[in-house]
Amino acid sequence: MKRLTFLAAALAALTGAGVDVSPASAQSFQSFTCADGARFVALLDPKVANVQIDGKAVALRKRYTLTGVRYTGRGITLTMNKKGTLLRHGKRGPTACTAT
C-alpha cells in the first residue's frame, strides 16, 4: 500500500511540474486504407503494434530492419519505411496502404 501511495504522489508531482507522463505520449494511433480495399486501425507502441483488421484484434511484435519498421504476427506483416506502408495479410500479396 505504501508503494502505491508513493507512486501516486510521484505521478502527481510530475504532472504538476508540467511533465507529460501519459501512456499516450509513447503511442501513435493511426487508421490506414490499402489499395486492395482493406482498412485497418493500428496502435503503434515502441515494441508492439496492436492492429484491428477484419474485425479481429492482433498484436504484432516489432522486428528489426535496416530501414524502417516491421511488425509481424499471426500471418500479418506491417512494414513502414520512407517509401510507404505495406500490408501482407494472410495469403494475399503485399498491398500499399496510406494513413487516413
Image: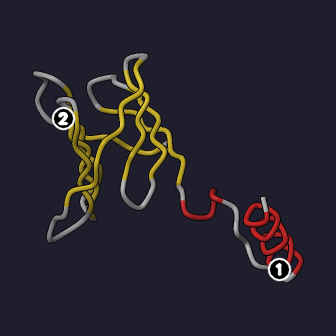
Instruction: Specify few, some or many for label 1: CA neighbours under 10 Å numbering under 14, 14-19, or 20 or more.
Output: few
* Residue 20 appears left or right of 50: right
CB contact under 8 Å: marks 1 and 2: no
Instruction: Specify few, some or many for label 2: CA neighbours under 10 Å numbering under 14, 14-19, or 20 or more.
Output: some
* Residue 40 appears left or right of 91: right
Residue found at x 63% / y 57%: 24
5 to 90, vertically: above or below: below
Label 1 sits on what residue type? Gly
User: Which residue is nearer to you in this view: 85 or 15?
Assistant: 15
52 to 66, vertically: above or below: above
Which quadrant of the figure contains the N terminus? bottom right
The mark total stands at: 2
Secondary structure of the residue carrying numbered label 1: loop
Query: Which quarter of the figure has residue 14?
Result: bottom right
Query: Which quarter of the figure has residue 87?
Result: top left
Mark seen at residue 88: 2
Disc number lying in front (1 or 2): 1
Residue found at x 75% / y 68%: 7
Task: Find residue 31 and report its horizontal and vertical position in percent.
Answer: 49, 39
Residue found at x 85% / y 78%: 13
Earlier-in-chain disc, 1 versus 2? 1
Residue found at x 23% / y 37%: 73
Instruction: Report how far apart the C-alphas of labels 1 and 2 lie in the structure.
Output: 41 Å
Mark seen at residue 87: none
Residue matched to label 1:
18
Query: Which quarter of the figure has residue 64?
Result: bottom left
Secondary structure of the residue carrying numbered label 2: strand
| View extreme (bottom): residue | 17
Label 2 sits on what residue type? Arg
Task: Find residue 96 and report its horizontal and vertical position in percent.
Answer: 25, 40
